[in-house]
Amino acid sequence: MTWETIVKSHHYLTLLPNMRDYDEEYRFFNWERARDELEGLPGGNGLNIAHEAIDRNANGARRDQLAIRWLGRNGEMRDFTYIQLRGLTNHFADVLRKLGVEKGDRVFSLLGRIPELYVVAMGTFKNRSVFCPLFSAFGPEPIKSRLTIGGARVLVTTEALYRRKIAPIRDSLPFLEHIILVGENHQHTNVPGTLDYYQLIYEASGHFIIQHTDPEDVALLHFTSGTTGTPKGAVHVHKAVVAHHMTGSYALDLQDGDIFWCTADPGWVTGTSYGIIAPLTNGVTVIVDEAEFDVERWYSILQNQKVSVWYTAPTAIRMLMKAGTEVAREYDLSSLRFLASVGEPLNPEAVVWSHKTFGRPFHDNWWQTETGGIMIANYASMDIRPGSMGKPLPGITAEIVNRNEDGTLDPIKDPDKHGELALRPGWPSMFRAYWNEPERYQKCFSDGWYLTGDLARKDADGYFWFIGRKDDVIKTSGHLIGPFEVESILMEHPAVAEAGVIGKPDPMALEIVKAFVVLKPGFLPGEDLKLEIIGFARSRLGAAVAPKEIDFTEDLPRTRSGKIMRRLLKARELGLPEGDLSTLESSPDA
Ligand code: ATP
Ligand code: MG
């Protein structure tokens, strides 16, 4: 084959990244053109997420293609094509319509990762109601507060979850009109005061015409992870789908024929924007795994399902690293083409490890519940700088800003200077409000910028580097230290699996750096190892930045979305109140 024929062959073309030239695309991109990649509702009737994700594909060439492959906890498997999803989501939209649930009404889900969750989400969009997913592992209190804040009209849950978590609080939820129960194994349910999901679906029509949907109509209410405090309800509109679609293509490089696995639960925004919407609008096949993290299970899924694009989080990657490269070698992971990570800073060590283990690097990207979609990323066509979040998406203006005394903000021109990461408002998936908290929302904006609450720096080539959350940054003897920098170096020590770093108040230094360290299997905690790790950190970071104190611990406190809760490490260290623990992974009331 000549070079020319190789280049022309379809096979070769599909291996080229969607975005070939970042600089050019960044320069010429505009959101109107991105919107034109989507179809819009028939007859110019607006823009609806579910139409773009499902019906547009079901009405066209992807009609019989696999949209979702569901892997059950006990080995079951269920497949859904685009046309099947169109029917099922029409049924659920019709269920809502018949119940009198209207545009703008909040439909909550409290479901594990089961197929019905995906049908409920999309059916809710079709009915123009507002979808609000909750982690099924939440305890009654976090569930109650979110249902109350969001003014839920409908809740879809399972019979088992209902009995354990909703029945005890039902009396305090007078506004909650309909509770729909999904029975085990498609069984009908018969619980007084509730409706049966399968009965309703069975009685509903498979034909549903989506009514006029203004791109600014509210589609999603998503609570933040609660890493820094009480979770906030971020409001997103149907137009967000333009950003989901574009970022799925540019930042995750989703291409025709891809098998995509986003490991996040839809209780966290990544599981909705990229576990449901973006892959479906891009017409790929989505893998959904009902089970929780397990090293062997995950490698089996990557191998057996021939996953080509994998989107996961640093916590999971660190756990895979802890299990060792040899385990990965037992599997054929050759289908993997693109690996991405989000949620926390990705330690450079993890990028190096992934190169060694998968022959491919993890691509870190940065975003928040508030931004609705990926904002800064390492792209398939760009050289990765391990430890960097990458560069802003086309259509996104990001800067490191400095606050002047008069409250105005100036982008920092000097490379590598620390400041707050700020974005120019106006991208389609930007949150439109914090539910019922207008003041908190207003506070995020200043002088024409959206302030993210994260500190970062930008290098001379335009790559962004995460320093830390404003609340987590450590001030010691005139230095400003981000915990991530220290944690990443600690992880380079052969005994360290994970580390969480905080500032501990100190009369002399203002704060001292303290690290909580989880050891790899085979290493025993002890004074010698402590001194060795401190010495190692000193040689790499200098005495001012290296931890002065180390505590060994079995595990670090984490949110359900997998983020280290440094505020909790700190509160426990200082014996202070622990604050809002609703999103803590091992929450006592779950
Ligand atoms: P809350 O705002 O309630 O405290 P949260 O900020 O953890 O919770 P999310 O919206 O889920 O809630 O998380 C977004 C935050 O996660 C970002 O602001 C940032 O601090 C962190 N983050 C996400 N991706 C990255 C990344 N690639 N590198 C560094 N930090 C990241
Ligand atoms: Mg936040």
Image: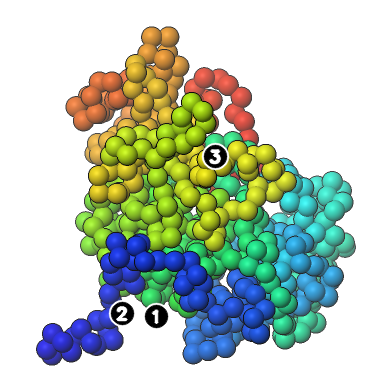
Q: Nearer the viewer, residue 587 or 99?
A: 99
Q: How many marks?
A: 3
Q: Is residue 28 left or right of residue 92?
A: left
Residue under label 2, please give it. Answer: 14
Residue under label 3, please give it. Answer: 446
Work out whether residue 243 can be spotted: yes
Residues at discs 3 and 1 in contact (Cβ within 8 Å): no
* Image quadrant occupied by the N terminus: bottom left
- Crowding at mark 2 (Cα within 10 Å: few <14, some 14-19, many 20+): few
At which x and y percent is residue 506?
A: 42, 13
At which x and y percent is residue 376?
A: 39, 53
Distance Cα–Cα, label 3 vs label 1:
43 Å
Question: Where residue 257 is drawn, which disc sits there?
Answer: 1
Mark nearest the camera among 3 and 1 is 3
Q: Nearer the viewer, residue 35 or 579?
A: 35
Q: Nearer the viewer, residue 201 or 454?
A: 454
Secondary structure of the residue carrying tag 3 is strand
Residues at discs 2 and 1 in contact (Cβ within 8 Å): yes
At which x and y percent is residue 118?
A: 61, 69
- Residue located 52% across and 51% down the image: 425
Tell me the amino acid under the disc marked 2.
Answer: Thr
Q: Quadrant of residue 266?
A: bottom right
Tell me the amino acid under the disc marked 3.
Answer: Ser
Distance Cα–Cα, label 2 vs label 3:
43 Å
Of the two numbered discs 2 and 3 on the same chain, state the one appearing first in sequence: 2
* Image quadrant occupied by the C terminus: top right
